[in-house]
Structure formats: C-alpha cells, structure tokens
C-alpha cells in the first residue's frame, strides 16, 4: 500500500472534518494509531503548544498571539471576535487587539483552550 503524503492530504483531511470537537477527536485518534513511521510528521496538530518564535507578524504586541500552526478554522474569531481577525491574504488568524478586562481575557483563554491545533499562545511579551 502506498504511504500517504501528509503535505498532500493533511489540509484536505482537516477541511473535511466539520466541527472543532470532531477535529479534536480525529487528531487524538490519529496520534494513537500506528499509521507507519512518519505519517503524522508535518501535520498541523503535531506541536503541543503555540511557539512565540513562530507567531505571525500581524499579531499586535502583547500576551496573546497566533503562530504559524493556524489552520484558519475560525474558532478563535467566533469565540473572541473583538480580538482575533483573519488574514485574507495568508488564510490564518491573528490577534489584532489585546484584551484588558478580565471578561475579555477569559474569552481569549477560551479561544486558546479550544484551538484544535494549539496555535494560540498567551506567553507573549506584555510590553512589546
């Protein structure tokens, strides 16, 4: 049987899974399955957390940011639309406004915790 190319199929697979909850279940199952050496390498859900070194330049300075693992699923923009926007050119989300009130921080944390690929970070520099 031919080994599947993750670069060829991972984006299509993600697009076919309709809800975030279902995506998370598929990602968890994929990590448990023995699909052959390297099958999951390069898939956008491999990294355990957002990496500040890979954050998009569009992010406004501050605690919250989106890194390059973003799959443009829209969850963060639906959860906290006052803080996340979509880059139409790049097809990813970014933080365009940092929250200051606790209720808004809670919304951004909900987006972070719900992100299916853990592309949202909250360890950004508050002053830069």
Image (cartoon, helix red, strand yellow):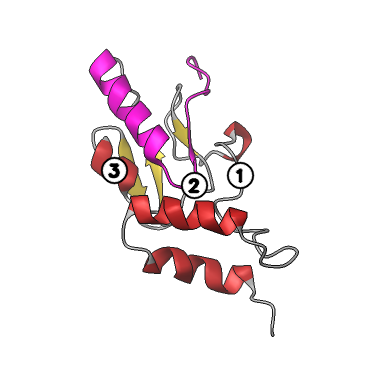
Query: What label does residue 7 carry, if any?
Result: none
**Residue 5, above or below 97:** below
- Kindly identify which residue carries mark 3: 77
Q: CA distance from mark 3 to mark 2?
A: 15 Å
Residue picked out by circle 1: 47
* Vertical comparison of 26 with 126: above or below: below
**61 is within the stretch colored magenta:** no
The residue lying toward the viewer, choosing from 78 and 32, is 32
**Where in the figure is residue 16, as x and y percent of width and height?**
38, 69
Tell me residue 43's x, y (percent): 59, 58
Is any atom of residue 95 visible in this view?
Answer: no
Q: CA distance from mark 2 to mark 1?
A: 8 Å
In front of the other: label 3 or label 1? 1
User: Are dots 3 and 2 in contact, CB under 8 Å?
Assistant: no
Total numbered badges shown on the rendered structure:
3
Location of the N terminus by quadrant is bottom right
Q: Earlier in the sequence, mark 2 or mark 1?
A: 1
Up the image or down, 54 lies above or below 7; here it is above
């Amino acid at each position: 049987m031919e080994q599947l190319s993750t670069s060829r199929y991972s984006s299509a697979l993600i697009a076919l899974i309709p809800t975030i909850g279902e995506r998370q279940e598929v990602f968890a199952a994929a990590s448990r399955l023995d699909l052959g050496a390297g099958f999951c390498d390069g898939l956008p859900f491999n990294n355990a957390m957002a990496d500040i070194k890979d954050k998009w330049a569009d992010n406004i300075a501050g605690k919250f940011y989106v890194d390059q693992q973003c799959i443009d699923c829209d969850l963060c923009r639906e959860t906290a639309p006052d803080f996340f926007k979509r880059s139409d050119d790049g097809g990813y989300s970014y933080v365009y406004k940092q929250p200051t009130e606790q209720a808004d921080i809670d919304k951004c944390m909900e987006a972070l915790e719900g992100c299916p690929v853990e592309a949202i970070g909250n360890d950004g520099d508050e002053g830069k």
